[in-house]
Amino acid sequence: MNERKDFKKGILTSAKEIARIAVFVALAIAAQYLLSAVPSVEVITLLFSAFAFVYGAARGAIAGVAFSLLRQFLFGFFPTVLVLYLVYYPLLSLCFGLLGRWTKKTDWKTALIASALACVCTVAFTMIDNLITPLFSGYSERAWGLYFAASLPFMGRQLICVAISVGGLFFPLTKAFFLLKK
């Protein structure tokens, strides 16, 4: 079978492709673990956005599901976090996989578009969490409102981090992924 042809179809057919995703997931888990003690600082959005941009939405979504499941072993099992991650990371991968398909190049203009898209996705992450956690936890209407209000300052700090990290590192990281892809 022609590996290149199958790669374009979105089918995982070779050990090399599976290993590439596994190494990326290990990198993402290590990055999250190393930065977990620093509030509002995260590079997972940057990593997943660049990976999905280069390797496509399907591989990004597979990596997102693997990441979502494996991180439960490291950080503990929380059903709301699992559901949130299983929804969010495939959607993030879809957005950036489509961006990569449409632009087909990486430059600073694309990095700025990616930064704006990553910020929109970060807001979506918080809003999905603001829906899932109160529903799973059975919050009252008032508690739901308080949970939402409490999430806004955290989201603001995360938006700043995402804007800076994706804006500044998306271009070099996608270049590195493109080199590894060859």
Image (cartoon, rainbow, N blue to C red):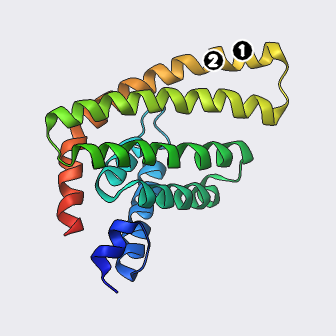
Q: Quadrant of residue 22?
A: bottom left
Query: Which residue in the structure is indicated by mark 1?
Result: 146
Q: Is residue 75 left or right of residue 12?
A: right
Q: Residue at x 15, y 35 (%)?
A: 108
* Inter-mark Cα distance, 2 to 1: 6 Å
Question: Residue 165, position in %: x, y?
Answer: 30, 35
Q: Quadrant of the N terminus?
A: bottom left
| 177 on left or right of 32 | left
- Residue 177 found in image quarter: bottom left
**Disc on res. 150:** 2
**Secondary-structure class at tag 2:** helix
Q: Position of residue 99 (x, y in %)?
A: 32, 42
* Quarter of the figure with the C terminus: bottom left
Q: Amino acid at mark 2?
A: Ala
Picture coordinates of residue 89 (x, y %)? Answer: 51, 47
- Vertical comparison of 72 with 35: above or below: below
Q: Are marks 2 and 1 in contact (CB under 8 Å)?
A: yes
Which sits in the foreground, 122 or 10?
Answer: 10
Q: Residues within 10 Å of mark 2 (few under 14, many from 20)?
A: few
At horizontal 41% and vertical 25% (from top left) the residue drawn is 159
